[in-house]
Image (cartoon, grey):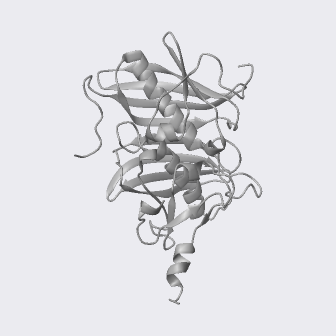
Amino acid sequence: MSDDNPPEGFLRIDFDRDRPVTFNTHVGTLYCKRGTKGTRDEFVLGFRVHPHMCNPAGGLHGGMMMTVSDLVGTMGGGTLVGLRKFLPTVSMTFDFVAPAQRGDWVEGRAEVVRQTRSLLFTEIALTVGETRILRASQIAKIPSGEGQTFGKARLDRSAEVAAKRPPA
Amino acid sequence: MSDSSSVPPGFQQLTATGFAEANGPWFEKVEGSRLIRGFLPGPQHSNTHGIVHGGMLAAFLDSLMGSTVFHVLHRRCVTVRLSIDYLLPARVGVWLQGEAEVLGRDEQMVQVRGRLYGPRHDVLAGLGAFALLHRQRVPKIIRS
């Protein structure tokens, strides 16, 4: 979406790469920022709140918060521990701490609590600026063997590439 | 549910806005105190593996549980906490429905249990705490 105006460093996540639209694309647009390893910004997911993400009261729908934090846990948590597999969610608990509204820029970060051979325990926070709007904890399954990769998701670097291109 | 690839008889389509509209249509059937809600998952509800996205399931169950509170207690509410266990995957093109039950309440909070299930198996189990809004109050989020 052109009016998302993501902060510096965020790139659109291209989940489907010209294939039919799946849920992650349908609810979005979702963005991702990668930062220095070991910092809280190592993996950040972000999105701008639009009407199609809102509840009848005009605030960000809880379903959207849950969708994004699920993704932050499996995709972000997996990235933090170096797993490129698709991790199916086993269990999640969400605390809806505060509302967000149309136009807000929401960010999601994960913290890995523990990784076992078959499970990944993460804590997830969604924030608007300094305000935390959702706290979640997740248990995801780590499939044995190679497993499936995380779909075809990749970061759309076309804007970044265009910016770096020397003026003609 | 003889034909699981279509909306079963007796279900009415809900009018919706925003997130619910974008991810609908959702259907409802009322049988006395029972409120049953369902939807037919399409490709737009799925992840890249052809199963229904966990976020979509969570959103649908949350909405169903909140609506059950309104159906049973005639009070509007907001979700404070929701805990969800993913039991088995739900498939695209296979009708999915759910119902919820009010377990307990006081003046401020309601405890609700909910589940989603397909024609063959349970998909999702949820337990939630919802805060009741005052009778006259409409949730207001947009700062004026």
In the image, A54: left or right of B61? left
Q: Is residue A13 above or below residue B12?
A: below
Q: Residue at x 66, y 21 (%)?
A: B8
Residue positioned most to the top? B32
Q: Is residue B127 above or below residue A67?
A: above
From this viewpoint, is residue A121 visible?
no
Pick whichever, B27 or B99, lies toward us: B27
In the image, A25: left or right of A60? right
From this viewpoint, is residue A146 visible?
yes
Q: Position of residue B131 (x, y in %)?
A: 34, 30
Q: Residue at x 59, y 47 (%)?
A: A23
In the image, A121: left or right of A56? right
Q: Position of residue B121 (x, y in %)?
A: 70, 27
Residue positioned most to the left? B144
Q: Residue at x 37, y 17 (%)?
A: B73
Q: Position of residue B34 (x, y in %)?
A: 52, 14
Residue positioned most to the right? A145
Residue positioned most to the front? A168
Q: Position of residue A25 (x, y in %)?
A: 57, 53
Q: How many marks?
A: 0
Pick whichever, B84 or B73, lies toward us: B73
Could you say which quadrant of the image residue B70 lies in? top left
Could you say which quadrant of the image residue B45 lies in? top right
Q: Residue at x 54, y 40 (%)?
A: B23
